[in-house]
Image: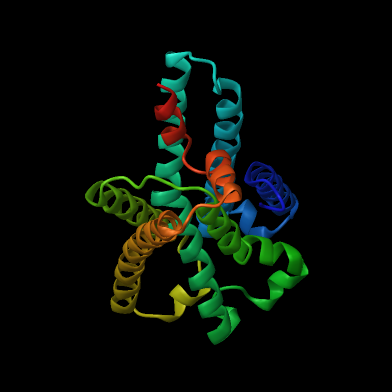
């Protein structure tokens, strides 16, 4: 039996993201006052995505609790829509963008931190907040994937959505450079136009790969769970933290 119910974990994770966002916005950094504000950084956009996603998760848990055994088909239909939104958000945004931010940030940081996170930022952003933005995102999203089954959209629509997000952000970064004459990330200043095109194309490909990785990981986790002989504790855990759509279907 789980030591901490997954519903409680989701509330705790949501509160942690709210705290991180509030602390980050409270920091008075020069970059926050320039064109685009915090919204020019993928890290901040990812934090908003994660907070919205876990907010949807908490709302889904509350709705599931309120509609349980109610027999109201309209409420159950609305709950199915909410669950579909939750699953779509994880598949297309929360997992690929979250993993991308963690992987790319720490890879470039290990090579040369001045290219992605200059030492000057240590005067503004405490270490715990940096890890809250660039580290804990990964274990949080893996915990959610492990505790709840998520129905992925069709592969073509999912890849189209993540490509749209990637290209939109790249165009946003280029527009900021067009307006201000400065690149959002320092390392873009030190590479040529051809290298930037290759980098932007590679990031889009990586985003697509991470989407496929999430799809495979989700299937692997839950296919493995189904092949195990279910214990009483596993059954109770799946009913409370698994896919509520399946539970609703059994009651209709």
Q: Please tell me whether residue 196 is drawn above or below residue 6 in the rendered image.
A: below
Judge by depth and name the residue closer to the eye, 129 or 245. 245
Residue 184 in sight here = no
- Farthest residue to the left: give it: 156
Query: Which quarter of the figure has residue 169?
Result: bottom left
The type of colouring in the image is rainbow
How many marks are shown on the rendered structure?
Answer: 0
Judge by depth and name the residue closer to the eye, 170 or 74. 74
- Residue at point 71% right, 50% down? 4
Judge by depth and name the residue closer to the eye, 184 or 90. 90
- Farthest residue to the bottom: give it: 111
**Could you tell me residue 226's position as x and y percent?**
42, 54
- The quarter of the rendered structure image containing the C terminus is top left
Judge by depth and name the residue closer to the eye, 107 or 145. 145
- Residue at point 65% right, 45% down? 14
- Residue at point 30% right, 67% down? 205
**Could you tell me residue 249's position as x and y percent?**
39, 28
Left or right of 181? Residue 142 is right
- Residue at point 42% right, 61% down? 224
Left or right of 20? Residue 80 is left
**Could you tell me residue 155's position as x and y percent?**
25, 52
Left or right of 133? Residue 35 is left
Q: Please tell me whether residue 28 is drawn above or below residue 245 in the rendered image.
A: below
Residue 143 in sight here = yes
Q: Please tell me whether residue 225 is drawn above or below residue 250 in the rendered image.
A: below
**Could you tell me residue 162's position as x and y percent?**
34, 53
């Amino acid at each position: 039996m789980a030591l901490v119910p997954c519903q409680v974990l989701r509330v705790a994770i949501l509160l942690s993201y709210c705290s991180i966002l509030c602390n980050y916005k409270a920091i008075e950094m020069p970059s926050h006052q320039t064109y685009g504000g915090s919204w020019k950084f993928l890290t901040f956009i990812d934090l908003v995505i994660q907070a919205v996603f876990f907010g949807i998760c908490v709302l889904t848990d509350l709705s599931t609790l309120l509609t349980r055994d109610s027999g109201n088909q309209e409420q159950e239909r609305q709950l199915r829509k909410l669950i579909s939104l939750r699953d779509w958000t994880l598949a297309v945004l929360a997992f690929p963008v979250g993993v991308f931010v963690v992987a790319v940030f720490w890879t470039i940081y290990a090579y040369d931190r001045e290219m992605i996170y200059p030492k000057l930022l240590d005067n503004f952003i405490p270490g715990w907040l940096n890890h809250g933005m660039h580290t804990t995102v990964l274990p949080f999203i893996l915990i959610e994937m492990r505790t709840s089954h998520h129905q992925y959209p069709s592969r073509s629509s999912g890849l189209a959505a993540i490509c749209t997000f990637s290209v939109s952000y790249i165009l946003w970064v280029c527009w900021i450079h067009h307006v201000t004459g400065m690149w959002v990330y320092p390392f873009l200043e030190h590479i040529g136009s051809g290298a930037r095109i290759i980098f932007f194309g590679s990031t889009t490909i990586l985003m697509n790969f991470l989407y496929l990785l999430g799809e495979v990981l989700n299937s692997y986790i839950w296919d493995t769970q189904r092949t195990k002989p279910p214990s009483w504790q596993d059954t109770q855990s799946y009913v409370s933290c698994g896919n509520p759509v399946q539970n609703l279907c059994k009651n209709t």
